[in-house]
Amino acid sequence: MRAVEEFDVIVVGAGPAGLAAAMTAVRNGMKTIVIERGEFPGAKNVMGGVLYTQPTSRLVPEFYQEAPLERPVVEQRYAFLDGDNAFTAGYRSPAWADPPYNAHTVLRAKFDRWLAKKAEAEGVLIITETVVEDLLYKGDAVAGVRTGRAEGDVLGKVVILAEGVNALISKKAGLHTQLGPEHVAVAVKEIISLPREKIEDRFCLEEGQGATLELLGDATAGMIGTAFIYTNQDSLSVGIGCLLSEMVKHQANPNDLLERLKAQPYVRKLIQGGETKEYMGHLIPEGGYKAIPKMYRQGVMVVGDAGMLVNGIHREGSNLAIISGMVAGEVAAGAVNSHDLSQQSMKLYQDRLKESFVLQDLYKYRNSAHLFEENPQFFTTYPEILSGAAHEFFTVDSMPKAEKQKKIWKMITGKRAKGDIIRDMWKLWRTMG
Ligand SMILES: Cc1cc2nc3c(=O)[nH]c(=O)nc-3n(C[C@H](O)[C@H](O)[C@H](O)COP(=O)(O)OP(=O)(O)OC[C@H]3O[C@@H](n4cnc5c(N)ncnc54)[C@H](O)[C@@H]3O)c2cc1C
């Protein structure tokens, strides 16, 4: 083995999961290295991206005083598109514009870089432009990682795999199986520049405030997925993500879907006059609880996206990454201090995630992926029903209201039989309620 230096903890990947793991390990006295393949942390990382304050504060208290954030989110809006029509609903709270906030929009290239600097200031060693190619073993025990560099072996007692959705090292280590097309969403995103005042006018925001808009139904051409528009300081993040299985089934192309979305009248007005500055694509692990791989083995833990820790229903991924990273960092330190790097010792990581919202939430929605795959009407017929019902309801045409209501009901049951609607609502309640 071409060993150079030995660490207590080696972290693969400098996304939120990896940086949280490394910072926690260092705070617990561990000599820690993060190995990142990108030119700098965040260089290749993609997120919508809404960053939640409370979980992030658990890693860096009051990070919002110094982190490069875009806008505090005061409104979360939903739009169900049906052709040129849009049925919208949302919630706005001006209280979210002030500390302790609920969430901020962020651009990952800036945020990850800042978090990495923070980690370095605390004593984490971060090596960039270095790809980890495999784990190193001493007998059955993990002994470090092999990188793509000459003289690139790094020895360590515990390896935390925070390598994101592709999880190549986790797969090599037998912790992850190949993801099926029903387990990942393909997402594309554009950053469209727009003057601040225009953003504030179009989203009815006070100066500096932000909003999120999720778009469903025809936004994704009825495929299982969502589209989004998030307000940054002087740009909008506009994107769309659908399950790969759906894209294949409908022979759809994410770029065409995004162009189609941008041309929809409701969306077109929001982005009008903007200039596309960046275009990026990424996968999102959407397999849910049932697709979570084995999260640990002797001397190894898998955190964040690599561990399928994404709650697509609530648009939560970065927070699950941070919390899982923090738990893994603590467990790693405990294992090193007690000289017990066994599989049993690493299992504590999974046990503690089970006690937290991370695995409890994913367990709660464990059947949702299946529900939506089996019932595409939630992304096709129901948005149409909502839009059609609203259209009729709000159209004033001298028709008596009792007659109008009958007409609406007839339209609804013409699209979906009454018995099917009751069954659908029951299934939805059982899965999500
Ligand atoms: C379009 C889109 C929108 C999203 N929107 C939101 C949102 O609004 N809110 C939210 O909370 N979440 C959102 N998510 C999910 C969120 O981005 C992820 O859950 C989160 O980034 C996971 O963090 P991570 O650290 O596990 O992985 P990543 O952020 O993917 O980081 C993994 C890191 O590992 C590095 N790496 C990989 N392999 C190697 C290797 N072999 N050697 C060295 N380095 C390696 C990568 O370069 C990368 O820096 C979104 C995701 C996408 C794609």
Image (tube, grey):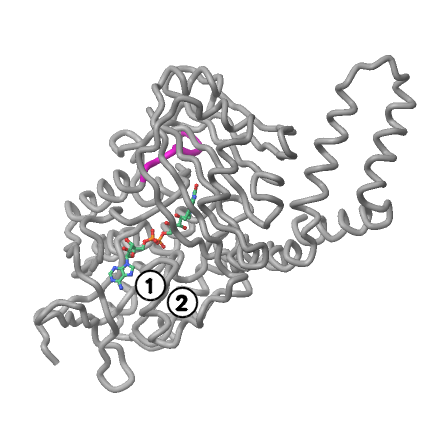
Query: Seen in the image, is 389 located left or right of residue 197?
Result: right
User: Would you say residue 13 sits in the magenta stretch?
Assistant: no
Residue 71 placement (x, y as % from top left): 37, 27
Residue 54 seen by the camera: no
Query: Seen in the image, is 273 located left or right of residue 27?
Result: right
Q: Residue at x 58, y 28 (%)?
A: 90
Q: Residue at x 74, y 53 (%)?
A: 427
Amino acid under disc 1: Val
5 above or below 105? below
Dot 1 and dot 2 residues touching (CB under 8 Å)? yes
Q: Which residue is mark 1?
A: 331
- Kindly identify which numbered label has been placed on residue 348: 2
304 above or below 58? below
Amino acid under disc 2: Leu
In this rendered view, identify the residue nearer to me: 215 or 35. Answer: 215
Quadrant of the image for the N terminus? bottom left
Residue 370 placement (x, y as % from top left): 63, 60
Location of residue 411 (image quadrant): top right
Q: Total label count?
A: 2
Query: Seen in the image, is 322 located left or right of residue 84?
Result: left
Residue 104 placement (x, y as % from top left): 39, 32
Badge 1 residue CB within 8 Å of ligand 1: no
Residue 212 seen by the camera: yes
In this rendered view, identify the residue nearer to me: 367 or 156. Answer: 367
User: Residue lying farthest top?
Assistant: 398
Q: Residue at x 12, y 69 (%)?
A: 152
The magenta segment is 101-107
273 above or below 22? above
- Find numbered disc 1 in the image and state the secondary structure of the residue it sits on: helix
